[in-house]
Image: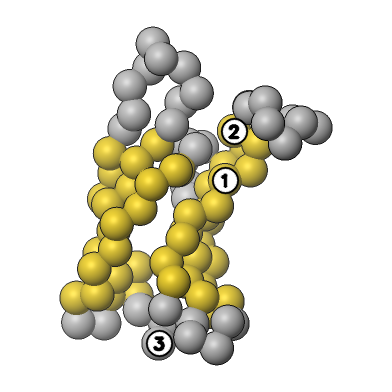
Amino acid sequence: DIVFTASAENTSDSYLDGKCMGSAIGVIDRKGDLVLLEPIDKTVKLEGIEADEVGNNIELLLVTDADDAAHPAQLYSASVKYPG
């Protein structure tokens, strides 16, 4: 399975960053089907993820990118129920 993050930015340019509108965590199974898509409650731009399957859960470490060198990345942890 593939665990991923997705973030939406308010911009018409595929290169230049825009204001982050939100992020989500998702899982795609081995058949290529989307089996989980969970929006993040806090408006942060997630750009890094580490995932470990622990029992029936996926334990996550998540890293943000504020697109501003004056604001350091933030590290979050989360747990989601494994959909498989």
Q: Residues within 10 Å of mark 1 (few under 14, many from 20)?
A: some
First in sequence: mark 2 vs mark 3: 2
Under mark 3, the amino acid is Gly
Q: Which residue is mark 1?
A: 7
Using residue 1 as the reference point, say whether residue 59 is left or right of it. left
First in sequence: mark 1 vs mark 3: 1
Under mark 2, the amino acid is Cys
Residue 20, position in %: x, y?
A: 59, 33
Measure the C-alpha gap from mark 2 to mark 3. 30 Å
Q: Are marks 2 and 1 in contact (CB under 8 Å)?
A: yes
Measure the C-alpha gap from mark 1 to mark 3. 24 Å
First in sequence: mark 2 vs mark 1: 1
Q: Which residue is mark 3?
A: 84
Numbered disc 3: secondary structure: loop
| Nearest the eye: 9 or 56 | 9
Q: Quadrant of the N terminus?
A: bottom left
Residue at x-position 29% and y-position 63%: 51
Q: Residues within 10 Å of mark 2 (few under 14, many from 20)?
A: some
- In the rendering, which numbered label is found on residue 21? none
| Nearest the eye: 84 or 13 | 13
Q: Are marks 1 and 3 in contact (CB under 8 Å)?
A: no
Numbered disc 2: secondary structure: strand
Residue 41, position in %: x, y?
A: 47, 47
| Nearest the eye: 38 or 11 | 11
Quadrant of the image occupied by residue 69:
top left
Residue at x-position 63% and y-position 43%: 8
| Residue 78 can be seen, yes or no | no
Residue furthest left in the image: 54
Using residue 6 as the reference point, say whether residue 58 is left or right of it. left
Q: Which residue is mark 2?
A: 20
Residue at x-position 19% and y-position 75%: 54
